[in-house]
């Protein structure tokens, strides 16, 4: 979007409209098809979507819920988008998220007596390190041995998930040892979870008199979006990353150390997802149990693509997706429509933003400008081998 | 026809010679293990700790766990050999399982005597549903040129959402594929007992492994499939309709994944549970890679991965707790990472341009 700065106001408006048109049409179409699916199963889509809307923005508590859902989405979306810019496909956000969670919780439950000004940043940093490590491994394996990051990140997701379950494992009646982070009291009741993180490592609430359990993590996530934007478009590193993403060979001949840039990009992407895990744990859950995956499966991918892999686009689409997820509970309560319909809508949104041709065909739109084509090509070029 | 052209490219073949060597070793290892297992089964060793690793129940469990992984991996092989990456196996499997379950429940309602019919129709539905999911994948990735990873993600998310949305926990399926014991063969010590007393889909999977291996490497279809996966332009020059064939193969691949789903519902569990594939599609992907994109190799890998699950189970039953189960479960994923970073990932078959050109 920054290339629009010099143009005048009307063409800026046009450009903005052009940028948001496709994502908006994708969502609208996905919701329409979602409605058809509801009709097929005998549900009332109007009642469902009204419930959805009310559950997303209908009250302050609904809005709080939307913000709470959007917070980790922003960070995982940024993670996927960042890797995209380097021509890499980070399908491992959920593993990095979990490693970030485990690392931050490990710091969060220890160091009794540490002042919050040190403890909280330390716990957040631990989350970033955990995620960066997990992402960095995938990047390093790619550069070192040519192992495709999609395969390694999928495998690392499962390893992370099993590792995380082990750390909090309550132990078994047959003498299985409990995991290192498991809470002995909960373990006695055969519940696998960590102790609560100490007060000094918790992210403070944001305007608690107004919102419900919204914490400063959302501000941190927004700040990270700005930081990512700044790094990508205002620094040499960002220039190198984007060059590698567009053409690794050209980047190599231009003197950029492609391998180093790729590993670093994956580590940063992993760090962002790890931070998402840390923020979710330190700001909302205050502990980890194996079922807390934070709902980051493939949402990060949808969000990154819906946001056109731009940091600010990611923020917008995170709130949109956050709203969908937040509203789905109220939708189910009000209209009896299973909230899983949101998964269907999400899949369709992903399909439509990835295949704008379908939307163009449906709405009889003109062909894309070369600029848009380039954007698309960048996203697609991340899969060059195999 | 393949052999002659293969020999001409000696320079490139050090790696594939290495694969041949390792595959010979794996055969030897397999024979040794089985001989040993028979010994354990037939002698006093049965009472020792060896039973945990080589007992009949461990091997049986391994095979049963390997069936869906094998079918999933075959699905991956057929798609990826023709140039379509399929990370959506998980979704196709889940959708297939759900389709099978719905039809099973509906036909069951007609009466108990309809069991064979309901099993047949349910299996067919699984194939159909898997095929439809795969067609969507093909449509997105071929017609609309969507990145195939994204398209696969769409399939997984779509399948998860749709199956959970339409699932009704009150539905109850009655009866499943029983074991068919093949006379004589099942009398072979251990090997026969493990291999020849299984359900129909298990046999089907075993047959498919062999059939796919032969078809892929010794038939016109196989040659073309590998050609369009390795060098589509060359294949196109030779008059192969690359995209048509990719559609066709992807749909067949989806049907195989659907069959894996049918196995879960109709042969293993008997019911459908939300998210019941539980990552098997991804382990299939791992098996395919570890098996170096060949049907027999994938089957071997699937057996190995199934075996790790069997070990977990045996350890649990035997009350062995010193190794946390989480770490045993990690093995397939760790092994896969080792495989793609080691030489296995590099030994994808050599570029087929020369071979195709000569053999036509």
Image: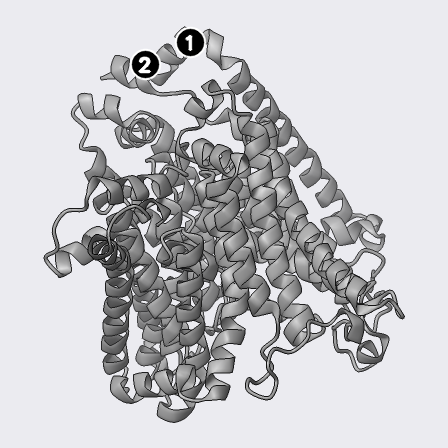
Q: Position of residue B27 (x, y in %)?
A: 61, 31
Say above or below: A63 vs B38: below
* Between A214 and B308, the one nearer to me in the picture: A214
Whether residue A90 is visible to the viewer of this picture, yes or no, is: no
Tell me which corner region of the image, top left, top right, bottom left or bottom right, holds residue A294. Answer: bottom right
Tell me which corner region of the image, top left, top right, bottom left or bottom right, holds residue A68. Answer: bottom right
Q: Position of residue B299 (x, y in %)?
A: 52, 42
Say above or below: A301 vs B25: below
Judge the density around disc 2: few (<14), some (14-19), many (≥20) Cα neighbours within 10 Å.
some
Whether residue A343 is visible to the viewer of this picture, yes or no, is: yes
Tell me which corner region of the image, top left, top right, bottom left or bottom right, holds residue B295. Answer: top left
Callout 1 touching callout 2 (CB < 8 Å): yes
* Between B83 and B51, the one nearer to me in the picture: B83
Which quarter of the rendering shows the C terminus of chain A? top left
- Could you tell which of marks 1 and 2 lies nearer the N-terminus? 1
Picture disc at residue B354: 2
* Between A308 and B193, the one nearer to me in the picture: A308
Q: Is residue B224 left or right of residue A316?
A: left
Say above or below: B87 vs B238: below
Residue name at image x 45 percent, y 68 percent: B265
Q: Is residue B326 left or right of residue B291?
A: right
Q: Is residue B214 left or right of residue A129?
A: left
Picture disc at residue A222: none
In the picture of the structure, the residue carrying the numbered disc 1 is: B9
């Amino acid at each position: 979007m920054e290339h629009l700065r010099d143009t005048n106001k009307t063409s800026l408006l046009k450009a903005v409209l052009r940028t948001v048109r496709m994502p908006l049409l994708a969502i609208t179409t996905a919701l329409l098809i979602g409605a058809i699916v509801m009709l097929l199963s005998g549900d009332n889509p109007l009642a469902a979507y009204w419930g959805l809307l009310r559950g997303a923005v209908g009250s302050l508590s609904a809005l709080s819920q939307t913000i709470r859902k959007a917070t980790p989405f922003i960070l995982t979306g940024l993670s996927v988008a960042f890797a995209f810019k380097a021509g890499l496909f980070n399908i491992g956000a959920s593993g990095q998220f979990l490693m970030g969670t485990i690392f931050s919780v490990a710091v969060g439950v220890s160091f009794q007596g540490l002042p919050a000004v040190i403890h909280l940043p330390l716990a957040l940093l631990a989350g970033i390190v955990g995620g960066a490590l997990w992402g960095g491994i995938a990047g390093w394996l790619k550069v070192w041995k040519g192992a495709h990051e999609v395969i390694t990140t999928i495998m690392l997701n499962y390893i992370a998930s099993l590792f995380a379950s082990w750390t909090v494992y309550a132990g078994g009646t047959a003498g299985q040892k409990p995991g290192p982070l498991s809470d002995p009291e909960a373990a006695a009741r055969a519940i696998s979870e960590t102790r609560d993180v100490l007060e000094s490592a918790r992210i403070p609430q944001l305007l608690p008199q107004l919102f419900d359990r919204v914490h400063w993590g959302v501000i941190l996530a927004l700040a990270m979006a700005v930081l990512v934007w700044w790094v990508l478009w205002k620094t040499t590193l960002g220039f190198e990353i984007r060059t590698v993403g567009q053409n690794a060979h050209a980047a190599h001949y231009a003197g950029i150390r492609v391998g180093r840039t790729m590993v670093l990009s994956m580590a940063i992407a992993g760090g962002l997802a790890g931070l998402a895990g840390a923020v979710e744990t330190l700001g909302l859950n205050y502990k980890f149990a194996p079922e807390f995956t934070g709902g980051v499966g493939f949402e990060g991918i949808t969000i990154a693509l819906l946001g056109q892999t731009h940091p600010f686009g990611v923020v917008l689409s995170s709130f949109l997706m956050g709203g969908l997820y937040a509203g789905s509970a109220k939708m189910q309560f009000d209209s009896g429509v299973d909230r899983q319909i949101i998964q269907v809508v999400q899949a369709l949104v992903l399909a439509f933003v990835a295949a704008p041709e379908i939307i163009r065909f449906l709405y009889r739109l003109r062909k894309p400008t070369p600029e848009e084509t380039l954007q698309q090509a960048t996203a697609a070029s991340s899969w060059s081998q195999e | 026809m393949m052999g002659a052209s293969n020999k001409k490219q000696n320079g490139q073949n050090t790696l594939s010679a290495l694969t041949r060597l390792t595959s010979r070793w794996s055969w030897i290892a397999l024979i040794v293990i089985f001989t040993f297992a028979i010994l354990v089964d037939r002698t006093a060793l049965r009472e020792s700790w060896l039973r945990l690793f080589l007992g009949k129940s461990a091997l049986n469990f391994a095979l049963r766990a390997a069936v869906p992984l094998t079918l999933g991996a075959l699905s991956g092989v057929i798609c990826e050999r023709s140039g379509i990456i399929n990370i959506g196996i998980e979704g196709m499997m889940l959708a297939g399982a759900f389709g099978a379950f719905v039809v099973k429940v509906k036909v069951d309602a007609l009466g108990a005597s309809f069991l064979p019919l309901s099993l047949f129709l349910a299996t067919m539905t699984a194939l159909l549903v898997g095929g439809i999911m795969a067609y969507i994948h093909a449509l997105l990735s071929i017609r609309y040129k969507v990145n195939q990873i994204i398209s696969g993600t769409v399939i997984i998310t779509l399948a998860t959402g749709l199956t959970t949305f339409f699932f009704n926990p009150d539905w109850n399926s009655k009866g499943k594929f029983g074991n068919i014991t093949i006379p004589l063969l099942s009398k072979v010590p251990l090997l026969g007992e493990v291999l020849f007393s299984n359900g129909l889909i298990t046999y089907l999977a075993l047959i498919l492994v062999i059939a796919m291996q032969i078809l892929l490497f010794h038939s016109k279809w196989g040659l073309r499939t590998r050609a369009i996966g390795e060098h589509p332009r060359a294949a196109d020059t030779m008059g192969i309709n690359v995209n048509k064939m990719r559609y066709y193969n992807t749909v067949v691949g989806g049907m195989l994944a659907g069959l894996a789903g049918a196995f879960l519902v109709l042969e293993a569990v008997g019911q459908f549970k939300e998210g019941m594939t539980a990552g098997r599609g991804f382990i299939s992907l791992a098996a395919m890679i570890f098996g170096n994109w060949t049907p027999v190799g994938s089957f071997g890998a699937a057996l190995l991965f199934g075996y790790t699950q069997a070990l977990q189970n045996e350890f649990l039953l035997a009350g062995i707790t010193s190794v946390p189960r989480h770490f045993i479960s990690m093995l397939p994923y760790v092994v896969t990472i080792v495989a793609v970073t080691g030489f296995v990932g590099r030994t994808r078959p050599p570029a087929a341009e020369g071979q195709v050109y000569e053999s036509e």
